[in-house]
Image (cartoon, rainbow, N blue to C red):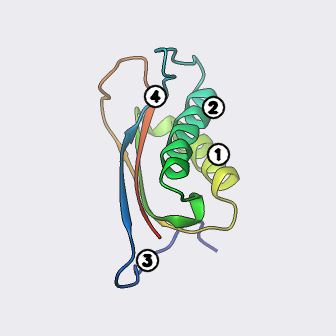
Amino acid sequence: MASYAQGVRVPAGADLLFISGQAPQTADGHVPETFDEQCRLAWDNVIAVLTAAGMTVRNLVKVTVILAGPRYRESCSRIRREVLGDHRPAMLYTFADLWVDSWLLEIEAVAAG
């Protein structure tokens, strides 16, 4: 079974929350060294935005993960499954140079509630 959905329908009248790209960086500017630490921090930052809006990861309908390279795919997928559990939003992984050289990923998302 895929750990993501091919499509997710948002009910009419649902509140939509568009989450800007969340970097693997703390409020004071610290960027962890390892990919796993960065990935968990970026997810923590997504969850903080959801929480501030009164939502949880169960409200996610679309997630885009931008990776610094394909070597991070498996670790990223493993951590995403840990964070989301059995929740299956629509997903996209892509590879790109990121805004800050020390970042290894960035996560943006759309939630509905």
- The residue tagged with tag 3: helix, strand or loop? loop
* Quarter of the rendering containing residue 67: top left
- The crowd level at tag 4 (other Cα within 10 Å; few <14, some 14-19, many 20+) is many
**Residue that mark 2 sits on:** 36
**Residue that mark 1 sits on:** 79
* Quarter of the rendering containing residue 6: bottom left
Viewer-closest of 100 and 25:
25
Q: Earlier in the sequence, mark 2 or mark 1?
A: 2
Question: How much space separates mark 2 and mark 3, taking CA atoms?
Answer: 28 Å
**Residue that mark 4 sits on:** 104
Q: Amino acid at mark 1?
A: Ile
**Residue that mark 3 sits on:** 8
Circles 2 and 1: CB atoms closer than 8 Å: yes
Q: Earlier in the sequence, mark 1 or mark 3?
A: 3
At 30% from the left edge and 29% from the top edge, which residue is drawn?
97
Question: How much space separates mark 4 and mark 1, taking CA atoms?
Answer: 14 Å
Q: Amino acid at mark 3?
A: Val
Quick check: 25 left or right of 99? Answer: right
Picture quarter with the N terminus: bottom right
